[in-house]
Image (cartoon, rainbow, N blue to C red):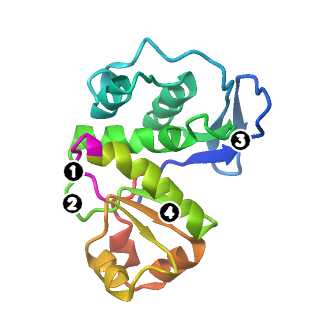
Amino acid sequence: MAIPGVVCMAMGDNGTIHRQHGVDKCPDRLYIKVMVNPHAQGYSDLPPYLQSHPVTGWLSARGWSYHPHQVETCAHAMAGRDVLLFAPTGAGKTLSGFLPSLVDLVEHEVPEHQLHTLYISPLKALAVDVHRNLIRPIEETGLEITVETRTGDTPASKRQRQKTKPPHMLMITPESLALLLSYEESDQYFKYLKY
């Protein structure tokens, strides 16, 4: 099984952060660091895969546009590079982290019940918050992408269903992930994981 790409979102402070790029080596992997200038202008020269994407239209209808770090993070992730994004609150980390998944799920029409993207949150409340922010553009654009959470509070019936019919995107806590990994069929569950 191929190792899924990693797009990490790190919280920054609320001060001015100057844009920086760097390539760092981990023991086995390279990853791209992107630090954000929260005052940067919107991105105007979109790559083809974003020009007609439903989320692009959703942003435009609200008078918004992509931030440069969102487009750059997406490009790096889609090129198979791991990305670590440092950005202050409100700078668009959620969209940065999930945009590669949204593009891939739309372009390749991944069949339902195949886990494509896994978001591991140390806090249940954060998983729920990310889910809420992510589901809005998905629902409002009519994308057929399923997004769910799995925490200690997830009802047993939903957890059981998720074992056999996973969503495309799953927001999960480390404890719940450890339980999923302990199941005999976990290799099949994570077989199609890309991000």
Q: Are marks 3 and 2 in contact (CB under 8 Å)?
A: no
For the residues labelled 3 and 2, the Cα–Cα distance comes to 35 Å
State which tag comes first along the sequence, 4 or 1.
4
Q: Residues within 10 Å of mark 3 (few under 14, many from 20)?
A: few
Closer mark to the observer between disc 3 and disc 2: 2
Identified by mark 2, the residue type is Glu
Residue at the disc numbered 3: 25
The label shown at residue 144 is 1
For the residues labelled 2 and 4, the Cα–Cα distance comes to 22 Å
Q: Do the residues labelled 2 and 1 touch (CB within 8 Å)?
A: yes
Residue at the disc numbered 4: 128
Q: Are marks 2 and 4 in contact (CB under 8 Å)?
A: no
Residue at the disc numbered 2: 112
> Going by the picture, which residue comes out furthest to the front?
62
Up/down of 141 relative to 65, above or below? below
Query: Is residue 174 in the magenta section?
Result: no
Which residues, given as a range, are shown in magenta?
140-146
Residue 63 in the image, given as x and y percentages of width and height:
41, 21
Q: Do the residues labelled 4 and 3 touch (CB within 8 Å)?
A: no
For the residues labelled 1 and 3, the Cα–Cα distance comes to 37 Å
- Tell me which secondary structure the magenta stretch mostly adopts: loop
For the residues labelled 2 and 1, the Cα–Cα distance comes to 9 Å
